[in-house]
Amino acid sequence: MQEDKKNRLEEMVSKDIASSKRTTIILDKDERDFIDQMIKEGKEPGIKPLISKMLDVYQSMMIYDWRFPGEYYYGISRIAFVNVELINILIQQIAKEKWWEIGKEMGAAIKVSMETTLGLKAAQRENWENIFKRLKVQGFGDFYLKDKYLLLKTPFIGYTELWRGILEELFNVKLDTKTGVPPFVFEIKSQKSISTQ
């Protein structure tokens, strides 16, 4: 019995060694000081999680295709780092009655970008988690699906009618707004039929 446990342990350890690689990087003093300060302040738990997060963002946002400085593309869509205040100024110039309609146009554009870049049909619920992750990485907010509710925490736009239009068009659903302030809660009333065209 003891021998079996020892053999299984050795097998598990040898698998871990074979599947992982150790990498050494040399950091400048100011880079290492910056990382150490973030860890000390509790902003990062350690170097490994920090590098893993950086690689996830690098891959998710296709940073390897960016042309520095200033030309950032995610698939077919150009990305711009814009202050939320500027977006809000633009939105405030649009009549409130048009926010839902404008949101639908924005949702259609996001859908095209997501579907062509990720290769996922946005209307299919099994793809929503991947789309939620992408929207979060792009700064739209934190999205969750709870039963028949879509939750949006920390939205970068604070107007529910605009979000209702975006989400209805993106996910091909009919929504009922349940909250007027973040976190936004939308009840999924129905899913529209999916066109095969």
Image (cartoon, rainbow, N blue to C red):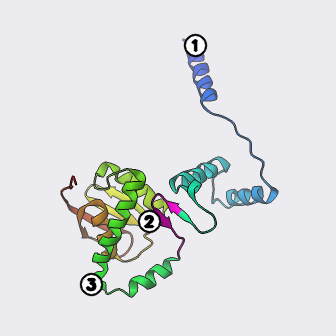
Q: Earlier in the sequence, mark 3 or mark 2?
A: 3
Residue underneath mark 3: 97
Distance from Cα at disc 3 to Cα at disc 1: 74 Å
Dot 3 amino acid type: Glu
Membership of 74 in magenta stretch: yes
Q: Residues within 10 Å of mark 3 (few under 14, many from 20)?
A: few
- Quadrant (top left, top right, bottom left, bottom right) of the C terminus: bottom left
Q: Which residues are magenta?
A: 73-82
Residue in front for this viewpoint, 162 or 78: 78
Image spot of residue 37 (x, y percent): 72, 60
> Which residue in the protein does label 2 denote?
141
Give the image location of residue 38, x and y in percent: 68, 60
Q: Mark 3 or mark 1: which comes first in sequence?
A: 1
Q: Amino acid at mark 1?
A: Gln
Viewer-side label of 3, 1: 3
| Quadrant of the snapshot with the N terminus | top right
Nearer mark to the viewer, of 2 and 1: 2
* Residue occupying image coordinates x 35% and y 61%: 111
Q: Is residue 158 above or below residue 44?
A: below
Mark 3 or mark 2: which is in front? Answer: 3
Pointer 1: what residue? 2
Indicate the position of residue 57 as horizontal and vertical percent values: 55, 55
> Which quadrant of the figure has residue 41?
bottom right
